[in-house]
Amino acid sequence: MKPFLAVDITNDKNNLELTGDNFKVEELPEDAFDSLDEAEEAVKVLVKKKAFPRALAYAIIINYCLTSWALVSLVLIFMHNFLESGKTEALKNLFGEYPWLYLVCLSSIAFTFFSVKYLLPKKKKDIESDEEIKLATDKVIAIENSLESRLGVSTDAVKVDIFSFNYKTKDNVFKPFINGRATNCEFKMFVENEKLCLVEISSGKYVIPYTSIKSIREEKGNIAFYMWNKEEKYNDEKYKKYKIVYDTHLRMYSVKKYCVVELEVDGEAWGIFVPTYEAETFKKVLVC
């Protein structure tokens, strides 16, 4: 099987060329994105302007680190009698010699709670409701819609996520998600003249013969991926059954299953790899 929108690193681990160009029928010229880049940059400038002053932002970050130390220290002191460790003994003596450290720890924890519970949400709400930012964002959306129109995106197109990943083949055996990771790319999908169309403005328009689509099957596999493209959060009730996990350290989402939309084009087997939560969307469009 050959995967759509993937990178073959069997013979070249530095390869960056995506598969699927044989399905591409149109793409936008580079200068078509000039106005979009300018509009997106304008939004970034406005958001930065409305964000916390740099000094306050640094203070919040430093305080988060201090809070982590404070929590660990207080727990170790509290558990000293159970742990009976030389390190906890030294820590307890330090706080005993400088009791004001207790006030520092409690103040740090209190400020962290205040910033997480009130300060950051309020700033986020202020930015989202700012009229100047709204107008700039609307301009970005309008330009994106214009670019999509140039690629013939239908008004009834639906958004779908498609996995892009590295793969290898060995002894004619296909091994997807070779490093266990993928990029979650959002496309607009619709049917036109009995052909399945997938459009992403920076990639172009891909057209797949409708008759080449054979089935949609589910596979097991631990996949970590970047980006969450849906309006609802990953842990929303709508997506709970897919058991999506978010790693705060790696800042990645992960699933234990994925789906493959199987194709056969000119005698060659192809697969579009998608998250399980997109299976129903594909089935509705493809009537599988």
Image (cartoon, rainbow, N blue to C red):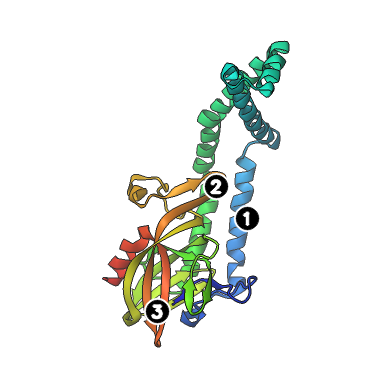
Ranked by sequence position, the earlier of labels 2 and 3 is 2
Q: Amino acid at mark 1?
A: Glu
The residue under the point 54% across, 31% down is: 116
The residue under the point 59% across, 72% down is: 9
Q: Are marks 2 and 3 in contact (CB under 8 Å)?
A: no
Q: Secondary structure at mark 1?
A: helix
The residue under the point 58% across, 16% down is: 81
Answer left or right for 247 relative to 260. right
Q: Which residue is mark 3?
A: 208
Q: Which residue is mark 2?
A: 133
Can see residue 225?
yes
Counting other residues with Cα less than 10 Å from the Cα at mark 2, is it few (<14), some (14-19), or many (20 or more)?
A: some
Q: Quadrant of residue 15?
A: bottom right
Can see residue 156?
no
Q: Secondary structure at mark 2?
A: helix
Ranked by sequence position, the earlier of labels 1 and 2 is 1
**x, y (%) of residue 187?**
44, 66
Q: Are marks 1 and 2 in contact (CB under 8 Å)?
A: no
Question: Between tags 1 and 2, which lies in front?
Answer: 1
Q: Could you tell me how far apart the alpha carbons at marks 3 and 1 are, in whole angstroms?
A: 34 Å
Q: Is residue 237 above or below residue 229?
A: above
**x, y (%) of residue 23?**
46, 80
Counting other residues with Cα less than 10 Å from the Cα at mark 1, is it few (<14), some (14-19), or many (20 or more)?
A: some
Q: Farthest residue toward the left? A: 287
Q: Amino acid at mark 2?
A: Ile
Q: Which residue is mark 1?
A: 41
